[in-house]
Amino acid sequence: MGVRAAHRDDRRTFRDRSEAGRVLARELSGYRDTSGLLVLGLARGGVPVGWEVAAALRAPLDVFLVRKLGVPRWEELAMGAIATGGGIVVNDRLVRSLGISEADLQAAVERETAELARREHAYRGGRPPVEVAGRTVILVDDGIATGASMLAAVRAVRSVGPARIVVAVPVGPASACRNIGQEADDVVCAAMPPGFEAVGQVFADFHQVTDDEVRELLGTPTV
C-alpha cells in the first residue's frame, strides 16, 4: 500500500474532469487488460473522470454513491460519510468536540441513506450494481478534501471481497492521500498541492455535474 504522485509537479492544473481522467489513465496503464477490472466513478463528479479511465483501460464503468454526513446547522462541514453497501466513516473527534448527539448522527445517516437510494434509482433505474467480488476495482473521484467520502467507499467495496482496490484522483492534500493509502492497495494522486484549499482549485472548468450527465456517461460504452 502507498501513494503515487502521477506527476511531481504539484502545481499542475486541468482543463476539466475529462483531461484529469486521461492523466490518471496514463498513470494506471499497468492495469489495462487486467482480468475482471472494474472502474467505479464516485457520483457525481467522479463519473466523467472515471469514464476516461475506463475507456483507456478497456474496462467497464459503473457509478458508486457516497454521501457526506453534514454537521447539523453547518451542513457543509462533514462529520463523516456513508456509501452504497453500508460503508460508513465518522469523524469521532469532530462529533465529540461539537457535542453532536447520537440521535443527530443517526438522523443524518438515515437522511443520507434515503438520498443514496434515490440516486441509485435515478442513475441505474432497475439495473443492479455491477458485481465487485473477486475483481480489481479502481475507485475514481474528481478529487479528495478530507478523504472521508473516499474512505467510506473503500470500506464499502472492501466488505464485498474485491481482489484489489485502487484509488485514483486528480488532486488531494498529501495527508488525506496517505490516510487512504493505509486502506487501499494502491493510490494515485496526480497533484498534492502544499497549499491545498479545495478540489476545484486545480480545474479551469469545475461545473456541477448533473444527473443527466451521469446517466449519459453510464450509457456510453467504455469497452
Image: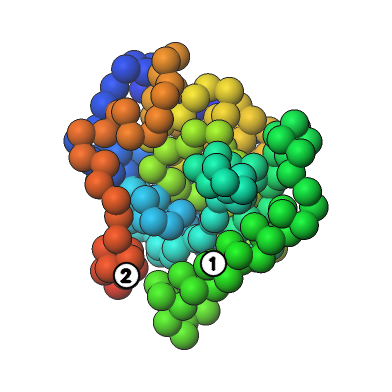
| Frontmost residue, 95 versus 190 | 95
Q: Residues within 10 Å of mark 1 (few under 14, many from 20)?
A: some
Residue 2 showing in the rendered view: no
Q: Secondary structure at mark 1?
A: helix
Q: Can residue 45 be seen from the camera position used here?
A: yes
Name the residue: 43% across, 21% down: 196
Q: Which mark is residue 41?
A: none
The image quadrant where one finds the C terminus is bottom left
The type of residue carrying mark 2 is: Arg
Residue 208: percent from left, percent from top: 29, 51
In the rendered image, the residue lying farthest to the bottom is 126
For label 2, the SS is helix
Determine the residue positioned at 76% across, 39% down: 99
Mark 1 vs mark 2, CA separation in Å = 15 Å
- Number of labels in the image equals 2
At horizontal 38% and vertical 43% (from top left) the residue drawn is: 142
The quarter of the picture where the N terminus appears is top right
Which residue does the numbered mark 2 point to in the structure image?
Answer: 215
| Residue to which mark 1 is pinned | 116
Q: At 42% from the left edge and 38% from the top edge, which residue is drawn? A: 143
Callout 1 amino acid: Leu
Residue 29 figure quarter: top left
Residue 189 percent coordinates (x, y) = 45, 31
